[in-house]
Amino acid sequence: MEFSALALAFEKIENAPGRLEMARLLSSLFSSAASAQECRQVAYMVQGSIAPAFEGLDLGVGERFAIAAVALCSGAGNEKVEERYKKEGDLGSVAQTLLGKKSQMALSSEKLTLVGVYSAFVRIAKTGGAGSQQMKIKALAQLLNCASPLEAKYIVRFALATLRLGVGEPTILDALVQFQISRVMRNAHTLKIDGDVEVENLQLALVEKEGEEKAADFQKISYEVKMGEGDAGKFASTLAEEKGKSKKRMELEAVAKSRFGDVKFIIEEAAQKEGSFLLHAIFTIGEKKKMREEYERAFNLCSDIGEVAAAVYDKPQEMREFSMKVFSPVRPALAERLGTAQEIIEKIGECAVEGKYDGLRMQVHRSDARVEIFSRKQEKMTHMFPEIVAAARQLPAKEFILEGEALAYNAGEDKYYSFQQTIQRKRKHGIAGKSEELPLHLFAFDILYLDGKEYTYEEYSARRNILEKILNGNKTIVPSKRIIAKTAQQLEAFFQSCINGGLEGIIAKDLKQPYVAGARKFAWIKLKRSYGALADSIDVVICGYYLGKGQRTEFAFGGLLTAVYNEESGKFETIAKIGSGFTEKEMGSFEEMLHKITIKEKPAGLESELVPYFWVKLKYVISVTADEITLSPMHTCGKGKGEDAKGYALRFPRMVELRIDKGPSEATTVSEIEKMFKMQKK
Ligand code: ATP
């Protein structure tokens, strides 16, 4: 694929009105990929990355160096580039304009390819050590020398990590479904109709829609179908028979078969025209949903959208069998909330009840001597926890993936340290595993994989048995404490003992449920110590900040504008302005931390009617508590359309802590807020 095709698609995606259109544009990009490798690269690059987050491969091109590269290849000089950049605020557009001026002169005739640009970025990312920045500038300038102005715009934004097209994994998964459906249809050789009639030797061609709008919804699509004479006769009589059934609308079930797999659809209309037919096909929600679930499951098992894109390209018929691999982090199963022990027992009956440790969630992967530890947001953090690595090596297994919550625990005094304390002590003592001073324990609560067998499908009880067996009396990795509760009283008593012992609450687990990666289900239900009317604290993304008045002016920090995540639209919606809960020291450090990520415009993907003093990149997540969830016209969280529409808002929100273990897409979702709003109204 030429890189120009990617740049053009980026431009369209940037201007697309919504997620549906983005997915459509992206699916045609996947269609023009010539290999699984190209599909993988498209999936990464459209998100502004070159590898999954857990690889930790950052481009690391600083602003100053990108300016130097633009100056070098446009011949404009550093100062001029810098001046324009200050004025325009986007170095990508500056590069586009400056290279546009140069384009009449001798630009290199060598065309950039996707693979070429991708490999150059990987080389840039891997260049380290002395003189590496100079080498990065040179490599970037080389790319820009061969780039058209539009290509230059996106190359520069990519290098600076300011691409921000607003395409998230859900949109990429939608696009892969569309890509697969249209690939099957374009290559279909056989149509099976109404379960028995088979029409073979087909040639299907997509009939382009006049209006973009229709094509974007990807519901109804027209195809021109060419077939041999005999088959055409058979097909015509099936159609005539169906029409003769005096239904209002024709609804013939059909399956298109191709070498890439099958797709079910409904023929809603079909008209004969000379040697061919014009079909109006409807791809039912059910069919798309099934495929979407398969792809999402694959993504949840590997946390690598490029891997999923490559698998869809290469082995679309094996997506159902996609399995987890050691060293690819699995997206975590999450817990639902209920307000009381009674509600939990009513919901899932007899259940396991485990202590809810307020530590750091870890997924530990091991194969022979190699051990890797991943965070809740799938980042590698192995080097920070040598004592857990050493303990994992002692377990009697060759390969496993297990999960637990790590925190400092003093077994002698039976004392747990909170997540904050654990991290502070860790910082103080450094990484070099001072286990006597910092007795870090991993309270293991699940096992997903062991010696070649995936355990996520097994029910909780079976997984727990296996887990306890392999922990085998290990001193550092120990099973989470738990009871089996038959009644609300038993559950409540255990909950109280956990709270008294310094834990956050409990997690009740359905004994019969499998481990559902990446989903918040009632298989796990959390009950935490009281947060007032709220069932839980809420994790919000910081999207801007205000300057302080009065006492606080000295810190130039007056509060935060925050948002939650809308999973349906992939956007962030504001829910609270937070001005309290900060110590003076925290205010100072927030100001310093946020100052580094201020941006001139509202972040892409944020819906906000409020404008803070500074916008910031969507990066940090904080936990907040509040008196209650209310309705307010000011916030966009869950807000409908119309003048009187109101969104959800937090009444008297207060900051609890910074959640370094969460990224923006792990923030509380709009649908969770809706549920919590209903819960508090009871
Ligand atoms: P929270 O902010 O309440 O920790 P979360 O959004 O990180 O929530 P949830 O799925 O809502 O995640 O709650 C479960 C979390 O509780 C897990 O992510 C894990 O970090 C932590 N946890 C502590 N103890 C356990 C346990 N015994 N079983 C499962 N999860 C546990």
Image (tube, helix red, strand yellow):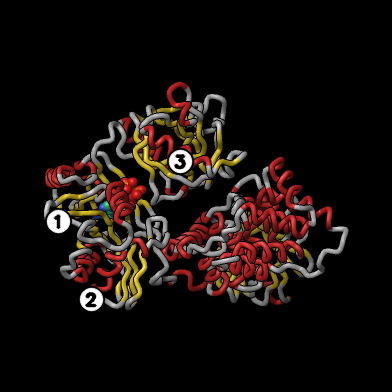
Q: Is residue 178 left or right of residue 669?
A: right
- Position in image of residue 509 (x %, y %): 24, 54
Judge whether 602 appears above or below 428 on screen.
above
Q: Which of marks 3 and 1 is nearer the N terminus?
A: 1
Question: Observer-nearest residue: 43 or 363?
Answer: 363
The residue under label 2 is 396
Question: Observer-nearest residue: 121 or 330?
Answer: 121
Q: Kindly indicate the quadrant of the structure image that contains residue 449.
A: bottom left
Question: Observer-nearest residue: 272 or 42?
Answer: 42
The residue under label 1 is 411
Q: Which of marks 3 and 2 is nearer the N terminus?
A: 2
Q: Which of marks 2 and 1 is nearer the N terminus?
A: 2
Report helix, strand or loop for mark 3. strand
Q: Is residue 140 left or right of residue 498?
A: right
Q: Residue furthest top?
A: 550
- Position in image of residue 619 (x %, y %): 49, 47
Observer able to see residue 193: no
Residue type of the residue flagged with mark 3: Val
Observer able to see residue 419: yes
Q: Residues within 10 Å of mark 3 (few under 14, many from 20)?
A: many
Q: Is residue 571 left or right of residue 675?
A: right
Residue in the picture at 23% in, 49% down = 417
Question: Observer-nearest residue: 506 or 116?
Answer: 116
The residue under label 3 is 564
Q: Kindly indicate the quadrant of the structure image that contains residue 343.
A: top left
